[in-house]
């Protein structure tokens, strides 16, 4: 019995040994595959932020009064330039006329006679009169001898003058005097200022009378009627009045 058990044990051992020998060897683990490193994405160039514009400084406030004053001065300056230009042109015309006369030995035929005449009436008397021709004063006198109130023309200018346009300025100071019902005029003074452009005809004797007078409008107060009238004409040289002394 013991021999059968031993034999069975030996057989079992023999049968088990091959089974153990036939067990397959464990498969080798696959080598780890190295993962490719992800390609680096090229970095985009950094864009500098746009410079922030500096806030515009507040515009200085404009003084409208200063601008208006500047424009007024500019217009006045332009007017003075125009006046001076005209004076220069007229002076050149007179110089050329005198030059021509001197070179040719003949008397300049173009002449002018300018006279003052008062027709303001008994309620007013002339105190002073100033006359300017082309920017030059040709007469400036107080009425100390009463000649500015005479009924006859008082000659202010007589001589050669260039043909063309000329400018005359008048400034007359009048004084009121009691006359009839207008007693309130006594002692009051009134200024008359006027400007007149006249044309001198070439080769002629040109006459211009400046008359202080009153407007015919009787609805106006006497002092408001004061005005200046200009009478221009061509005269015979034989009728030329004597110059004022």
Image: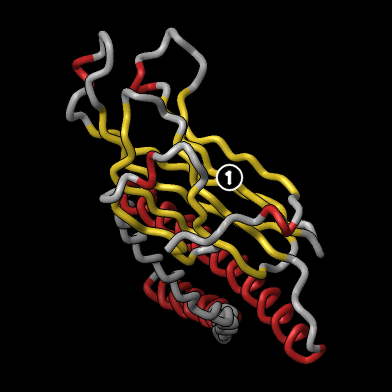
Q: Identify the residue at horizontal 36%, vertical 60% (top origin).
A: 56
> Which residue is denoted by mark 1 in the rendering?
209
Colouring scheme applied when the structure was drawn: secondary structure
Name above or below for residue 194 compared with residue 51: above
Q: Position of residue 171 (x, y in %)?
A: 39, 47
Q: Quadrant of the C terminus?
A: bottom left
Name the foreground residue: 34 vs 168: 168
- Does the rendering let one see residue 18? no
**Would you call the spot at circle 1 few (<14 residues within 10 Å), some (14-19), or many (20 or more)?**
some
Q: Identify the residue at horizontal 73%, vertical 59% (top origin).
A: 237
Q: Identify the residue at horizontal 37%, vertical 43% (top origin).
A: 172
**Helix, strand or loop under label 1:** strand
Name above or below for residue 47 compared with residue 244: below
Q: Position of residue 48 (x, y in %)?
A: 45, 75
Q: Position of residue 137 (x, y in %)?
A: 44, 64
Name above or below for residue 68 compared with residue 161: above
Name the foreground residue: 45 vs 227: 227
Name, please, the residue furthest toward the bottom: 103
Q: Quadrant of residue 173?
A: top left
Q: Position of residue 209 (x, y in %)?
A: 58, 45
Task: Left or right? Give the position of 61 relative to 212.
Answer: left
Name the foreground residue: 57 vs 24: 57
Q: Quadrant of residue 222?
A: top left
Task: Left or right? Give the position of 96 relative to 13.
Answer: right
Q: Quadrant of residue 3?
A: bottom left
- Does the rendering let one see residue 99? yes
Q: Quadrant of the N terminus?
A: bottom left
Q: Identify the residue at horizontal 62%, vertical 68% (top origin).
A: 159
Number of disc labels = 1
């Amino acid at each position: 019995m013991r021999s059968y058990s031993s034999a069975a044990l030996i057989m079992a051992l023999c049968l088990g040994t091959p089974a153990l020998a036939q067990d397959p060897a464990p498969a080798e683990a696959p080598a780890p595959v190295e993962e490719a490193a992800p390609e680096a994405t090229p970095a985009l160039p950094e864009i500098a932020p746009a410079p922030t514009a500096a806030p515009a400084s507040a515009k200085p406030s404009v003084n409208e009064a200063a601008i208006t004053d500047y424009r007024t001065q500019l217009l006045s300056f332009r007017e003075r330039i125009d006046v001076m230009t005209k004076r220069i042109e007229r002076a050149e015309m007179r110089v050329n006329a005198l030059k021509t006369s001197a070179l040719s030995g003949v008397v300049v035929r173009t002449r002018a006679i300018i006279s003052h005449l008062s027709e303001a009436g008994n309620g007013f008397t002339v105190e002073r009169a100033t006359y300017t021709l082309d920017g030059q004063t040709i007469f400036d006198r107080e009425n100390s001898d009463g000649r500015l109130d005479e009924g006859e023309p008082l000659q202010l200018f007589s001589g050669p003058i260039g043909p063309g346009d000329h400018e005359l300025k008048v400034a007359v100071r009048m004084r009121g005097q009691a006359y009839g019902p207008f007693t309130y005029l006594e002692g009051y003074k009134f200024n008359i200022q006027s400007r007149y452009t006249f044309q001198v005809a070439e080769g002629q004797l040109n006459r211009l009378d400046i008359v202080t007078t009153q407007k015919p409008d009787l609805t106006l107060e006497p002092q408001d009627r004061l005005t200046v009238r200009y009478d221009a004409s061509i005269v015979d040289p034989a009728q030329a009045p004597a110059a004022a002394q």
